[in-house]
Protein backbone atom coordinates (compact mmCIF):
# COMPACT_ATOMS: atom_id res chain seq x y z
CA UNK A 1 0.00 0.00 0.00
CA UNK A 2 3.02 2.27 -0.26
CA UNK A 3 1.76 4.24 -3.26
CA UNK A 4 -1.28 5.32 -1.25
CA UNK A 5 0.86 7.61 0.86
CA UNK A 6 2.00 9.60 -2.15
CA UNK A 7 -1.57 9.94 -3.32
CA UNK A 8 -2.87 11.10 0.05
CA UNK A 9 -4.10 14.66 0.39
CA UNK A 10 -3.66 16.00 -3.17
CA UNK A 11 -6.05 13.38 -4.59
CA UNK A 12 -8.93 14.38 -2.36
CA UNK A 13 -9.79 17.59 -4.13
CA UNK A 14 -8.40 17.59 -7.68
CA UNK A 15 -11.75 18.63 -9.17
CA UNK A 16 -12.03 21.66 -6.90
CA UNK A 17 -8.74 22.99 -8.12
CA UNK A 18 -9.78 22.48 -11.73
CA UNK A 19 -13.30 23.84 -11.76
CA UNK A 20 -14.04 25.70 -8.51
CA UNK A 21 -17.53 26.88 -7.60
CA UNK A 22 -20.31 24.40 -7.14
CA UNK A 23 -18.25 21.46 -8.42
CA UNK A 24 -15.91 21.85 -5.44
CA UNK A 25 -18.78 21.42 -2.98
CA UNK A 26 -18.62 17.98 -1.35
CA UNK A 27 -22.19 18.28 0.00
CA UNK A 28 -23.62 18.96 -3.48
CA UNK A 29 -21.77 15.83 -4.66
CA UNK A 30 -23.42 13.86 -1.84
CA UNK A 31 -26.87 15.27 -2.79
CA UNK A 32 -26.32 14.34 -6.45
CA UNK A 33 -25.28 10.73 -5.82
CA UNK A 34 -28.18 10.36 -3.36
CA UNK A 35 -30.63 10.67 -6.30
CA UNK A 36 -29.12 7.72 -8.19
CA UNK A 37 -28.75 5.69 -5.02
CA UNK A 38 -32.38 6.35 -4.06
CA UNK A 39 -33.57 5.21 -7.51
CA UNK A 40 -31.67 1.90 -7.34
CA UNK A 41 -32.64 1.22 -3.71
CA UNK A 42 -36.32 1.94 -4.35
CA UNK A 43 -36.34 -0.26 -7.45
CA UNK A 44 -34.74 -3.17 -5.62
CA UNK A 45 -37.61 -3.48 -3.16
CA UNK A 46 -40.70 -2.30 -5.11
CA UNK A 47 -40.49 -5.30 -7.42
CA UNK A 48 -41.36 -7.80 -4.67
CA UNK A 49 -44.66 -5.94 -4.18
CA UNK A 50 -45.35 -5.66 -7.94
CA UNK A 51 -44.56 -9.33 -8.73
CA UNK A 52 -48.03 -10.82 -7.99
CA UNK A 53 -49.69 -8.22 -10.26
CA UNK A 54 -47.07 -8.73 -13.01
CA UNK A 55 -47.79 -12.47 -12.81
CA UNK A 56 -51.55 -11.97 -13.20
CA UNK A 57 -51.29 -9.40 -15.99
CA UNK A 58 -48.63 -11.14 -18.10
CA UNK A 59 -49.72 -14.75 -17.26
CA UNK A 60 -46.29 -15.47 -15.79
CA UNK A 61 -45.33 -18.59 -13.86
CA UNK A 62 -43.65 -18.49 -10.42
CA UNK A 63 -40.38 -19.36 -12.15
CA UNK A 64 -40.82 -16.39 -14.55
CA UNK A 65 -41.41 -14.05 -11.61
CA UNK A 66 -38.25 -15.28 -9.90
CA UNK A 67 -36.35 -14.31 -13.04
CA UNK A 68 -37.79 -10.78 -12.88
CA UNK A 69 -35.70 -10.45 -9.71
CA UNK A 70 -32.85 -12.81 -10.61
CA UNK A 71 -32.00 -11.39 -14.06
CA UNK A 72 -31.52 -7.99 -12.40
CA UNK A 73 -29.40 -9.47 -9.60
CA UNK A 74 -27.24 -11.50 -11.98
CA UNK A 75 -26.44 -8.55 -14.26
CA UNK A 76 -25.81 -6.30 -11.28
CA UNK A 77 -23.53 -8.74 -9.46
CA UNK A 78 -21.55 -9.59 -12.61
CA UNK A 79 -20.74 -5.97 -13.53
CA UNK A 80 -20.33 -4.05 -10.24
CA UNK A 81 -16.54 -4.26 -9.91
CA UNK A 82 -16.23 -3.51 -13.64
CA UNK A 83 -18.40 -0.40 -13.11
CA UNK A 84 -16.12 0.81 -10.31
CA UNK A 85 -12.97 0.14 -12.37
CA UNK A 86 -14.33 1.97 -15.43
CA UNK A 87 -15.15 4.94 -13.19
CA UNK A 88 -11.67 4.94 -11.62
CA UNK A 89 -10.05 4.83 -15.04
CA UNK A 90 -12.23 6.97 -17.32
CA UNK A 91 -14.03 9.22 -14.86
CA UNK A 92 -16.45 8.44 -12.03
CA UNK A 93 -18.79 11.31 -12.96
CA UNK A 94 -19.00 10.02 -16.57
CA UNK A 95 -19.93 6.46 -15.59
CA UNK A 96 -22.28 7.58 -12.85
CA UNK A 97 -24.20 9.67 -15.42
CA UNK A 98 -24.19 6.82 -17.98
CA UNK A 99 -25.53 4.51 -15.24
CA UNK A 100 -28.35 6.92 -14.27
CA UNK A 101 -29.38 7.49 -17.92
CA UNK A 102 -29.33 3.78 -18.80
CA UNK A 103 -31.16 2.76 -15.61
CA UNK A 104 -33.90 5.34 -16.28
CA UNK A 105 -34.40 4.27 -19.92
CA UNK A 106 -34.43 0.56 -18.98
CA UNK A 107 -37.07 1.28 -16.29
CA UNK A 108 -39.39 2.87 -18.86
CA UNK A 109 -38.72 -0.03 -21.28
CA UNK A 110 -39.83 -2.55 -18.60
CA UNK A 111 -43.19 -0.79 -18.27
CA UNK A 112 -43.64 -0.73 -22.06
CA UNK A 113 -42.43 -4.34 -22.64
CA UNK A 114 -45.87 -5.99 -22.69
CA UNK A 115 -44.50 -9.53 -22.18
CA UNK A 116 -42.85 -11.37 -19.31
CA UNK A 117 -39.82 -12.12 -21.54
CA UNK A 118 -39.43 -8.40 -22.25
CA UNK A 119 -39.69 -7.53 -18.56
CA UNK A 120 -36.98 -10.10 -17.68
CA UNK A 121 -34.65 -8.91 -20.48
CA UNK A 122 -34.96 -5.20 -19.61
CA UNK A 123 -34.52 -6.01 -15.90
CA UNK A 124 -31.09 -7.45 -16.85
CA UNK A 125 -30.28 -4.24 -18.78
CA UNK A 126 -31.41 -2.23 -15.75
CA UNK A 127 -29.10 -4.32 -13.54
CA UNK A 128 -26.11 -3.65 -15.82
CA UNK A 129 -26.60 0.13 -15.69
CA UNK A 130 -27.19 -0.08 -11.94
CA UNK A 131 -23.72 -1.68 -11.75
CA UNK A 132 -22.19 1.35 -13.51
CA UNK A 133 -24.00 3.73 -11.16
CA UNK A 134 -23.69 2.13 -7.70
CA UNK A 135 -19.91 1.79 -7.09
CA UNK A 136 -19.20 5.27 -8.45
CA UNK A 137 -21.46 6.86 -5.82
CA UNK A 138 -18.95 5.86 -3.11
CA UNK A 139 -15.98 6.57 -5.40
CA UNK A 140 -17.17 10.15 -5.98
CA UNK A 141 -17.67 10.71 -2.23
CA UNK A 142 -14.23 9.27 -1.41
CA UNK A 143 -12.62 11.71 -3.87
CA UNK A 144 -14.21 14.90 -2.48
CA UNK A 145 -14.63 14.35 1.28
CA UNK A 146 -11.60 14.78 3.54
CA UNK A 147 -10.83 11.79 5.80
CA UNK A 148 -12.42 13.34 8.91
CA UNK A 149 -15.76 13.90 7.19
CA UNK A 150 -15.85 10.75 5.07
CA UNK A 151 -17.48 8.69 7.85
CA UNK A 152 -20.32 11.20 8.16
CA UNK A 153 -20.82 11.22 4.38
CA UNK A 154 -20.97 7.40 4.36
CA UNK A 155 -23.53 7.55 7.17
CA UNK A 156 -25.81 9.75 5.05
CA UNK A 157 -25.11 7.51 1.99
CA UNK A 158 -26.13 4.46 4.03
CA UNK A 159 -29.22 6.26 5.30
CA UNK A 160 -30.39 7.09 1.75
CA UNK A 161 -29.78 3.47 0.72
CA UNK A 162 -31.66 2.09 3.75
CA UNK A 163 -34.57 4.53 3.46
CA UNK A 164 -35.08 3.91 -0.27
CA UNK A 165 -34.99 0.12 0.22
CA UNK A 166 -37.46 0.34 3.11
CA UNK A 167 -39.75 2.83 1.31
CA UNK A 168 -40.02 0.50 -1.71
CA UNK A 169 -42.84 -1.67 -0.31
CA UNK A 170 -44.91 1.39 0.69
CA UNK A 171 -44.45 3.31 -2.59
CA UNK A 172 -44.78 0.09 -4.61
CA UNK A 173 -47.88 -0.96 -2.70
CA UNK A 174 -49.58 2.39 -3.31
CA UNK A 175 -48.74 2.43 -7.04
CA UNK A 176 -49.72 -1.21 -7.67
CA UNK A 177 -53.01 -0.74 -5.80
CA UNK A 178 -54.03 2.65 -7.22
CA UNK A 179 -52.25 2.98 -10.61
CA UNK A 180 -50.66 -0.13 -12.22
CA UNK A 181 -47.63 -2.38 -11.85
CA UNK A 182 -45.99 -0.53 -14.77
CA UNK A 183 -46.04 2.70 -12.74
CA UNK A 184 -43.60 1.08 -10.29
CA UNK A 185 -40.99 1.33 -13.06
CA UNK A 186 -42.22 4.57 -14.66
CA UNK A 187 -41.61 6.39 -11.36
CA UNK A 188 -37.87 6.13 -12.11
CA UNK A 189 -38.28 8.44 -15.13
CA UNK A 190 -38.83 11.73 -13.22
CA UNK A 191 -36.28 10.73 -10.53
CA UNK A 192 -33.75 9.86 -13.27
CA UNK A 193 -34.27 13.12 -15.19
CA UNK A 194 -33.82 15.21 -12.02
CA UNK A 195 -30.75 13.12 -11.06
CA UNK A 196 -29.18 13.62 -14.52
CA UNK A 197 -29.77 17.37 -14.62
CA UNK A 198 -28.60 18.01 -11.07
CA UNK A 199 -25.60 15.63 -11.28
CA UNK A 200 -24.43 17.05 -14.62
CA UNK A 201 -24.46 20.52 -13.04
CA UNK A 202 -22.68 19.80 -9.75
CA UNK A 203 -20.62 16.59 -9.92
CA UNK A 204 -16.83 16.99 -10.21
CA UNK A 205 -14.90 14.65 -12.49
CA UNK A 206 -12.53 12.37 -10.58
CA UNK A 207 -10.43 9.44 -11.71
CA UNK A 208 -7.26 7.57 -10.89
CA UNK A 209 -4.79 9.59 -12.97
CA UNK A 210 -2.32 6.70 -13.15
CA UNK A 211 -4.90 4.27 -14.57
CA UNK A 212 -4.92 5.79 -18.08
CA UNK A 213 -1.40 4.41 -18.64
CA UNK A 214 -2.39 0.89 -17.59
CA UNK A 215 -3.62 -1.93 -19.81
CA UNK A 216 -7.23 -2.85 -19.19
CA UNK A 217 -7.62 -6.26 -17.55
CA UNK A 218 -9.99 -7.86 -20.09
CA UNK A 219 -9.39 -11.46 -18.91
CA UNK A 220 -10.00 -10.36 -15.31
CA UNK A 221 -13.36 -8.84 -16.34
CA UNK A 222 -14.37 -12.05 -18.14
CA UNK A 223 -13.31 -14.38 -15.30
CA UNK A 224 -14.99 -12.30 -12.60
CA UNK A 225 -18.24 -11.82 -14.54
CA UNK A 226 -18.43 -15.54 -15.48
CA UNK A 227 -17.60 -16.63 -11.91
CA UNK A 228 -20.20 -14.37 -10.30
CA UNK A 229 -22.83 -15.30 -12.90
CA UNK A 230 -22.31 -19.03 -12.32
CA UNK A 231 -22.28 -18.65 -8.52
CA UNK A 232 -25.42 -16.48 -8.29
CA UNK A 233 -27.17 -18.64 -10.93
CA UNK A 234 -26.43 -21.79 -8.90
CA UNK A 235 -27.75 -20.15 -5.75
CA UNK A 236 -30.99 -18.83 -7.27
CA UNK A 237 -31.70 -22.16 -9.04
CA UNK A 238 -30.82 -24.24 -5.96
CA UNK A 239 -34.29 -23.52 -4.63
CA UNK A 240 -36.05 -25.20 -7.58
CA UNK A 241 -33.43 -27.74 -8.67
CA UNK A 242 -32.58 -28.85 -5.11
CA UNK A 243 -29.39 -27.92 -3.27
CA UNK A 244 -27.76 -31.31 -3.78
CA UNK A 245 -28.69 -31.66 -7.48
CA UNK A 246 -25.87 -31.96 -10.01
CA UNK A 247 -27.03 -28.74 -11.75
CA UNK A 248 -26.87 -26.64 -8.57
CA UNK A 249 -23.57 -28.09 -7.32
CA UNK A 250 -22.09 -27.85 -10.84
CA UNK A 251 -23.02 -24.17 -11.23
CA UNK A 252 -21.79 -23.19 -7.75
CA UNK A 253 -18.63 -25.27 -8.17
CA UNK A 254 -17.91 -23.73 -11.58
CA UNK A 255 -18.48 -20.25 -10.11
CA UNK A 256 -16.07 -20.85 -7.21
CA UNK A 257 -13.45 -22.32 -9.57
CA UNK A 258 -13.68 -19.31 -11.92
CA UNK A 259 -13.43 -16.91 -8.96
CA UNK A 260 -10.34 -18.79 -7.68
CA UNK A 261 -8.79 -18.49 -11.18
CA UNK A 262 -9.70 -14.79 -11.17
CA UNK A 263 -7.95 -14.31 -7.79
CA UNK A 264 -4.81 -16.08 -9.06
CA UNK A 265 -4.79 -14.08 -12.31
CA UNK A 266 -5.18 -10.79 -10.42
CA UNK A 267 -1.96 -11.45 -8.44
CA UNK A 268 -0.02 -11.94 -11.70
CA UNK A 269 -1.32 -9.18 -13.98
CA UNK A 270 0.37 -5.75 -13.94
CA UNK A 271 -2.89 -3.72 -13.80
CA UNK A 272 -5.48 -5.87 -11.99
CA UNK A 273 -9.23 -5.27 -12.11
CA UNK A 274 -9.46 -5.95 -8.35
CA UNK A 275 -6.07 -5.40 -6.67
CA UNK A 276 -5.61 -8.33 -4.28
CA UNK A 277 -3.41 -6.10 -2.07
CA UNK A 278 -6.65 -4.46 -0.85
CA UNK A 279 -7.41 -7.67 1.06
CA UNK A 280 -4.23 -7.32 3.13
CA UNK A 281 -6.25 -4.92 5.24
CA UNK A 282 -8.31 -7.07 7.64
CA UNK A 283 -10.90 -4.32 8.22
CA UNK A 284 -11.62 -4.15 4.47
CA UNK A 285 -11.84 -7.94 4.10
CA UNK A 286 -14.10 -8.40 7.13
CA UNK A 287 -16.14 -5.33 6.12
CA UNK A 288 -16.88 -7.07 2.80
CA UNK A 289 -18.00 -10.29 4.53
CA UNK A 290 -20.18 -8.38 7.05
CA UNK A 291 -21.75 -6.34 4.21
CA UNK A 292 -22.77 -9.58 2.48
CA UNK A 293 -24.17 -10.97 5.76
CA UNK A 294 -26.01 -7.70 6.45
CA UNK A 295 -27.93 -7.87 3.17
CA UNK A 296 -28.36 -11.64 3.39
CA UNK A 297 -30.39 -11.03 6.55
CA UNK A 298 -32.11 -7.79 5.49
CA UNK A 299 -33.38 -8.88 2.05
CA UNK A 300 -34.06 -12.47 3.11
CA UNK A 301 -36.07 -11.45 6.18
CA UNK A 302 -37.96 -8.63 4.43
CA UNK A 303 -38.92 -11.07 1.66
CA UNK A 304 -40.63 -13.58 3.97
CA UNK A 305 -42.02 -10.88 6.29
CA UNK A 306 -43.81 -9.30 3.31
CA UNK A 307 -45.19 -12.74 2.35
CA UNK A 308 -46.36 -13.23 5.96
CA UNK A 309 -48.05 -9.82 6.17
CA UNK A 310 -49.81 -10.08 2.79
CA UNK A 311 -50.57 -13.78 2.30
CA UNK A 312 -50.92 -15.05 5.89
CA UNK A 313 -52.32 -11.95 7.60
CA UNK A 314 -54.24 -10.70 4.54
CA UNK A 315 -52.98 -7.10 4.55
CA UNK A 316 -52.98 -5.12 1.28
CA UNK A 317 -49.56 -4.09 -0.13
CA UNK A 318 -49.95 -0.57 1.34
CA UNK A 319 -51.02 -1.89 4.77
CA UNK A 320 -48.06 -4.31 4.76
CA UNK A 321 -45.70 -1.50 3.78
CA UNK A 322 -46.98 0.82 6.51
CA UNK A 323 -46.53 -1.89 9.14
CA UNK A 324 -42.83 -2.18 8.25
CA UNK A 325 -42.33 1.60 8.71
CA UNK A 326 -40.57 1.09 12.09
CA UNK A 327 -37.83 -0.72 10.15
CA UNK A 328 -37.40 2.28 7.80
CA UNK A 329 -37.45 4.83 10.61
CA UNK A 330 -34.96 2.85 12.71
CA UNK A 331 -32.54 2.57 9.78
CA UNK A 332 -32.81 6.36 9.22
CA UNK A 333 -31.70 6.96 12.82
CA UNK A 334 -29.11 4.19 12.81
CA UNK A 335 -27.04 5.25 9.77
CA UNK A 336 -25.79 8.63 11.09
CA UNK A 337 -25.61 7.17 14.62
CA UNK A 338 -23.55 4.25 13.27
CA UNK A 339 -21.26 6.66 11.41
CA UNK A 340 -20.75 8.77 14.56
CA UNK A 341 -20.04 5.67 16.70
CA UNK A 342 -17.66 4.33 14.03
CA UNK A 343 -15.78 7.66 14.00
CA UNK A 344 -15.47 7.55 17.79
CA UNK A 345 -14.89 3.85 18.50
CA UNK A 346 -14.05 2.34 15.10
CA UNK A 347 -15.84 -0.41 13.13
CA UNK A 348 -14.67 -3.02 15.66
CA UNK A 349 -17.38 -1.70 17.99
CA UNK A 350 -20.15 -0.75 15.55
CA UNK A 351 -20.12 -3.78 13.24
CA UNK A 352 -20.59 -6.37 16.03
CA UNK A 353 -23.22 -4.17 17.71
CA UNK A 354 -25.21 -3.96 14.45
CA UNK A 355 -24.97 -7.72 13.87
CA UNK A 356 -26.08 -8.51 17.45
CA UNK A 357 -29.14 -6.25 17.01
CA UNK A 358 -30.03 -8.07 13.77
CA UNK A 359 -29.51 -11.44 15.47
CA UNK A 360 -31.85 -10.37 18.28
CA UNK A 361 -34.47 -9.34 15.68
CA UNK A 362 -34.24 -12.76 13.99
CA UNK A 363 -34.58 -14.72 17.25
CA UNK A 364 -37.57 -12.56 18.28
CA UNK A 365 -39.39 -13.83 15.15
CA UNK A 366 -39.55 -17.24 16.89
CA UNK A 367 -42.38 -15.79 18.98
CA UNK A 368 -44.50 -15.06 15.90
CA UNK A 369 -47.50 -17.22 14.98
CA UNK A 370 -50.05 -17.10 12.16
CA UNK A 371 -52.18 -14.76 14.28
CA UNK A 372 -49.62 -12.63 16.16
CA UNK A 373 -50.63 -9.14 17.28
CA UNK A 374 -48.77 -6.12 15.91
CA UNK A 375 -47.26 -5.59 19.39
CA UNK A 376 -45.06 -8.65 18.67
CA UNK A 377 -44.10 -7.40 15.19
CA UNK A 378 -42.70 -3.90 15.58
CA UNK A 379 -39.88 -4.59 18.11
CA UNK A 380 -37.93 -6.91 15.74
CA UNK A 381 -38.51 -4.40 12.91
CA UNK A 382 -36.83 -1.69 15.00
CA UNK A 383 -33.95 -3.97 16.04
CA UNK A 384 -33.42 -5.05 12.41
CA UNK A 385 -33.50 -1.44 11.14
CA UNK A 386 -31.04 -0.26 13.81
CA UNK A 387 -28.71 -3.18 13.09
CA UNK A 388 -28.78 -2.79 9.32
CA UNK A 389 -28.18 0.98 9.47
CA UNK A 390 -25.23 0.59 11.86
CA UNK A 391 -23.61 -2.18 9.81
CA UNK A 392 -24.10 -0.22 6.55
CA UNK A 393 -22.32 2.83 7.94
CA UNK A 394 -19.47 0.93 9.63
CA UNK A 395 -18.84 -1.59 6.81
CA UNK A 396 -18.84 1.15 4.14
CA UNK A 397 -16.30 3.01 6.25
CA UNK A 398 -14.24 -0.18 6.74
CA UNK A 399 -14.21 -1.04 3.01
CA UNK A 400 -14.01 2.27 1.12
CA UNK A 401 -12.28 4.14 3.94
CA UNK A 402 -9.43 1.61 4.06
CA UNK A 403 -8.77 1.55 0.31
CA UNK A 404 -6.35 4.02 -1.28
CA UNK A 405 -8.09 6.98 -2.93
CA UNK A 406 -7.01 5.78 -6.39
CA UNK A 407 -8.95 2.52 -5.82
CA UNK A 408 -12.09 4.20 -4.43
CA UNK A 409 -14.33 3.06 -7.29
CA UNK A 410 -13.04 -0.51 -7.12
CA UNK A 411 -13.63 -0.56 -3.34
CA UNK A 412 -17.14 0.83 -3.90
CA UNK A 413 -17.69 -1.93 -6.45
CA UNK A 414 -16.41 -4.55 -4.01
CA UNK A 415 -18.85 -3.36 -1.35
CA UNK A 416 -21.75 -3.21 -3.79
CA UNK A 417 -20.91 -6.71 -5.09
CA UNK A 418 -20.81 -8.12 -1.53
CA UNK A 419 -24.13 -6.42 -0.84
CA UNK A 420 -25.87 -7.81 -3.96
CA UNK A 421 -24.50 -11.34 -3.61
CA UNK A 422 -25.50 -11.32 0.08
CA UNK A 423 -29.01 -10.19 -0.86
CA UNK A 424 -29.36 -12.82 -3.60
CA UNK A 425 -28.14 -15.56 -1.25
CA UNK A 426 -30.40 -14.36 1.57
CA UNK A 427 -33.58 -14.45 -0.47
CA UNK A 428 -32.78 -17.80 -2.11
CA UNK A 429 -31.39 -19.63 0.92
CA UNK A 430 -34.03 -18.49 3.44
CA UNK A 431 -36.93 -19.15 1.05
CA UNK A 432 -35.40 -22.56 0.33
CA UNK A 433 -35.23 -23.30 4.08
CA UNK A 434 -38.89 -22.28 4.44
CA UNK A 435 -39.86 -24.53 1.47
CA UNK A 436 -38.07 -27.60 2.82
CA UNK A 437 -39.51 -27.14 6.32
CA UNK A 438 -43.02 -26.67 4.88
CA UNK A 439 -42.57 -29.85 2.85
CA UNK A 440 -41.52 -31.76 5.97
CA UNK A 441 -44.32 -30.54 8.27
CA UNK A 442 -47.33 -29.72 6.03
CA UNK A 443 -49.08 -33.11 6.20
CA UNK A 444 -48.70 -33.31 9.98
CA UNK A 445 -49.95 -29.74 10.51
CA UNK A 446 -53.00 -30.34 8.27
CA UNK A 447 -53.99 -33.51 10.17
CA UNK A 448 -53.40 -31.72 13.52
CA UNK A 449 -55.77 -28.98 12.32
CA UNK A 450 -58.47 -31.60 11.77
CA UNK A 451 -58.11 -32.54 8.09
CA UNK A 452 -58.56 -36.28 7.32
CA UNK A 453 -55.22 -38.01 6.68
CA UNK A 454 -55.92 -38.92 2.98
CA UNK A 455 -56.87 -35.32 2.18
CA UNK A 456 -53.81 -33.99 4.04
CA UNK A 457 -51.53 -36.33 2.08
CA UNK A 458 -53.13 -35.19 -1.18
CA UNK A 459 -52.45 -31.53 -0.36
CA UNK A 460 -48.74 -32.20 0.21
CA UNK A 461 -48.32 -31.46 -3.53
CA UNK A 462 -49.27 -27.85 -2.81
CA UNK A 463 -46.20 -27.22 -0.63
CA UNK A 464 -44.83 -24.56 -3.04
CA UNK A 465 -47.99 -22.47 -2.61
CA UNK A 466 -47.90 -22.95 1.18
CA UNK A 467 -44.21 -21.86 1.23
CA UNK A 468 -45.46 -18.54 -0.21
CA UNK A 469 -48.04 -18.30 2.61
CA UNK A 470 -50.98 -19.34 0.39
CA UNK A 471 -53.44 -21.94 1.70
CA UNK A 472 -54.47 -24.36 -1.11
CA UNK A 473 -58.27 -24.04 -0.89
CA UNK A 474 -60.64 -24.41 -3.85
CA UNK A 475 -63.86 -22.44 -4.49
CA UNK A 476 -66.05 -25.42 -3.57
CA UNK A 477 -64.12 -26.47 -0.43
CA UNK A 478 -66.59 -26.91 2.50
CA UNK A 479 -66.27 -24.25 5.23
CA UNK A 480 -65.09 -26.70 7.92
CA UNK A 481 -62.36 -28.17 5.71
CA UNK A 482 -61.40 -24.67 4.53
CA UNK A 483 -60.71 -23.56 8.12
CA UNK A 484 -58.59 -26.69 8.76
CA UNK A 485 -56.58 -26.22 5.53
CA UNK A 486 -55.92 -22.52 6.31
CA UNK A 487 -54.85 -23.28 9.90
CA UNK A 488 -52.60 -26.21 8.92
CA UNK A 489 -51.02 -24.38 5.95
CA UNK A 490 -50.28 -21.25 7.94
CA UNK A 491 -48.79 -23.27 10.81
CA UNK A 492 -46.53 -25.11 8.33
CA UNK A 493 -45.47 -21.76 6.83
CA UNK A 494 -44.64 -20.42 10.32
CA UNK A 495 -42.53 -23.56 10.97
CA UNK A 496 -40.53 -22.55 7.90
CA UNK A 497 -40.26 -18.93 9.05
CA UNK A 498 -38.92 -20.07 12.44
CA UNK A 499 -36.28 -22.28 10.77
CA UNK A 500 -35.20 -19.39 8.50
CA UNK A 501 -35.09 -17.01 11.49
CA UNK A 502 -32.81 -19.35 13.48
CA UNK A 503 -30.44 -19.71 10.49
CA UNK A 504 -30.31 -15.93 9.90
CA UNK A 505 -29.86 -15.24 13.63
CA UNK A 506 -26.99 -17.74 13.90
CA UNK A 507 -25.23 -16.07 10.94
CA UNK A 508 -25.61 -12.66 12.63
CA UNK A 509 -23.95 -13.92 15.81
CA UNK A 510 -21.13 -15.52 13.77
CA UNK A 511 -20.69 -12.18 11.95
CA UNK A 512 -20.57 -10.27 15.24
CA UNK A 513 -17.84 -12.60 16.58
CA UNK A 514 -15.83 -12.32 13.33
CA UNK A 515 -15.98 -8.50 13.38
CA UNK A 516 -15.11 -8.26 17.09
CA UNK A 517 -12.11 -10.59 16.79
CA UNK A 518 -10.89 -9.73 13.31
CA UNK A 519 -10.99 -5.93 13.07
CA UNK A 520 -8.25 -4.04 14.88
CA UNK A 521 -9.28 -1.28 17.27
CA UNK A 522 -7.70 1.36 15.07
CA UNK A 523 -7.43 0.89 11.34
CA UNK A 524 -4.60 2.48 9.45
CA UNK A 525 -6.14 4.70 6.83
CA UNK A 526 -4.16 5.01 3.61
CA UNK A 527 -5.17 8.65 3.18
CA UNK A 528 -3.62 9.63 6.51
CA UNK A 529 -0.11 8.62 5.51
Image (cartoon, rainbow, N blue to C red):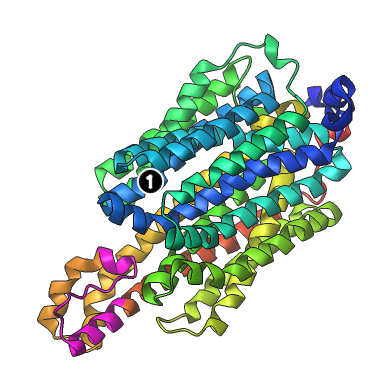
How many dots with numbers?
1
Q: Is residue 91 visible?
A: yes
How crowded is the residue under tag 1: few (<14 C-alpha within 10 Å), some, or many (20+)?
many
Above or below residue 332? Residue 485 is below
Residue lying at 35% horizontally and 50% vertically, measured from the top left: 66
Q: Position of residue 264 (x, y in %)?
A: 53, 24
Asked if one can make out residue 252 in the rendered structure from this viewpoint, the answer is no
Q: In which quarter of the image is residue 491?
A: bottom left
In depth, the one of 115 and 38 nearer the eye is 115
Residue 234 x/y as whole percent? 36, 42
Q: Which of 25 and 505 is in front in this view?
A: 25
Q: Does the magenta stretch include residue 485?
A: yes
For the residue pair 225 and 271, the one nearer the viewer reads as: 225
Residue sitting at x 78%, y 27%: 204
Check the image and name the residue furthest to the front.
179
The relative height of residue 376 versus residue 502 in the rendered view (above or below) is below
In the image, the segment drawn in magenta is: 464-489
Which image quarter holds the C terminus? Answer: top right
For this orientation, the residue located farthest to the left is 454
Q: Position of residue 480 (x, y in %)?
A: 20, 90
Specify the quadrant of the image occupied by residue 455.
Answer: bottom left
Secondary element at image label 1: helix
Residue 451 relative to residue 113: left or right: left
Tell me which corner region of the image, top left, top right, bottom left or bottom right, holds residue 114: top left
The residue singled out by tag 1 in the image is 68
Q: Does the magenta stretch include residue 387?
A: no
- The quarter in which the N terminus is drawn is top right
The percent position of residue 407, horizontal first and vertical second, equals: 71, 28
Q: 492 or 310, which is in the foreground?
A: 310
In the image, what residue occupies the spot 66% across and 39% down?
194
Amino acid sequence: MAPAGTLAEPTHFPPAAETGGRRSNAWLTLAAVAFGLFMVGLDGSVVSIANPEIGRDLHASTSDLQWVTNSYLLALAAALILGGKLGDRFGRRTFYLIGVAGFTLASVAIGLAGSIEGVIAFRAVQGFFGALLMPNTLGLLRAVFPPKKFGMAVGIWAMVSSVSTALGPIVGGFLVQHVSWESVFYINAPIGVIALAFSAAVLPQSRNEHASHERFDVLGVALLAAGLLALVFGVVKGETWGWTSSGTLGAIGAGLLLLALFGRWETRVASPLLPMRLFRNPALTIGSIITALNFFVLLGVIFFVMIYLQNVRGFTPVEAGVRTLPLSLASVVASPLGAALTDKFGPRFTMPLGMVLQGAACFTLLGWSAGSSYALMWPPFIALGLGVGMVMASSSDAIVGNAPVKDAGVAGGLQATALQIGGALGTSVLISLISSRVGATLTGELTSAGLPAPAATGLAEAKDAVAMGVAPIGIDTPAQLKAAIIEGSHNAFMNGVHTAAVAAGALCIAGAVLAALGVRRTTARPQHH
